[in-house]
Amino acid sequence: MKKVGLVGGISWVSTIDYYKLINEGVNKKLGGLQFAECLIYSLNFGDIQEKSWANSYELLWNACLSLQKGGVDAIVLCANTAHLYADQIEKEIGLPIIHIGTETAKAIRQENSSTIGLLGTSFSMEMDFYKDRLKSFGLNVLIPEKQETRDYIQHVLKEELGRGIINPDSKQKYIEIAKELITRGAEGIILGCTEIPLLISQADFDVPVFDTTKIHSEAIVSFMLS
């Protein structure tokens, strides 16, 4: 079994889901008492919030370097927004990064969708690093048009979901935002922040919903057992 290094804590709430899904996935394939061999470097999310994602490269790099020294075969960044630095880190550290955007795009393509709605952090929605990865697979990406809507999504991620707080009013608002994207032509919705699946899921929609935490975890299991 290959060993992976997880950069977690961004946030700890979704890192728990990664750990659970990866171990369950390995055990489903191998049975018995077979589980994942992995290392987790759990960052202090407060440090990233203090610096902002735009200035957090060094924090992520040091975490990846520590995992490299632990003898891992690949790196996993347990947050969509952290992939702002994925290509740079992969090049400099000399280990493959299992890219959440790539794996999500593959999953969308399997559903034969071409226009997709993206919900995520302000960075993931507004900057090009994530959307360009999806577009490289021929996808047309829609995000909420209004700045205040994107700011609201960010607020819930940071102040509620990142702390493990589940607010029914926020759930309803997220559903409404996603349905607006569907009205604009989205054939599916990307839950493009690893905390969003804590709030909404496939059960809330008639179109395909792409849970990036689940998709990423499945790809990690496949790598480990390859």
Image: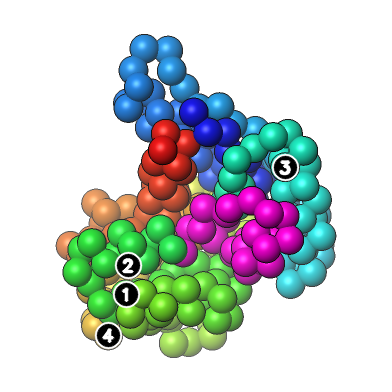
Crowding around mark 2 (Cα neighbors within 10 Å: few <14, some 14 to 19, many 20+) is: many
Q: Residue at x 41, y 73 (%)?
A: 134
Q: Is residue 108 above or below residue 226?
A: below
> Disc 2 vs disc 1: Cβ atoms closer than 8 Å?
yes
Q: Residue at x 51, y 58 (%)?
A: 99
Instruction: Answer left or right for 48 relative to 195.
Output: right
Residue marked by disc 3: 68
Q: Residue at x 54, y 61 (%)?
A: 80
Q: Is tag 1's residue or tag 4's residue first in the polypeptide sequence?
A: 1
Q: Is residue 226 above or below residue 87?
A: above
Residue marked by disc 1: 116
Residue range of the region highlighted in magenta in the rendering: 79-101
In the picture, which quadrant includes the C terminus?
top left
Q: How many marks?
A: 4
Residue marked by disc 4: 184
Q: Where in the figure is residue 79, as x and y percent of width and height?
A: 57, 55
Query: Which is in the foreground here, disc 1 or disc 3?
Result: 3
Q: Secondary structure at mark 3?
A: helix
Whole-angstrom CA distance, mark 3 to mark 4, is 44 Å
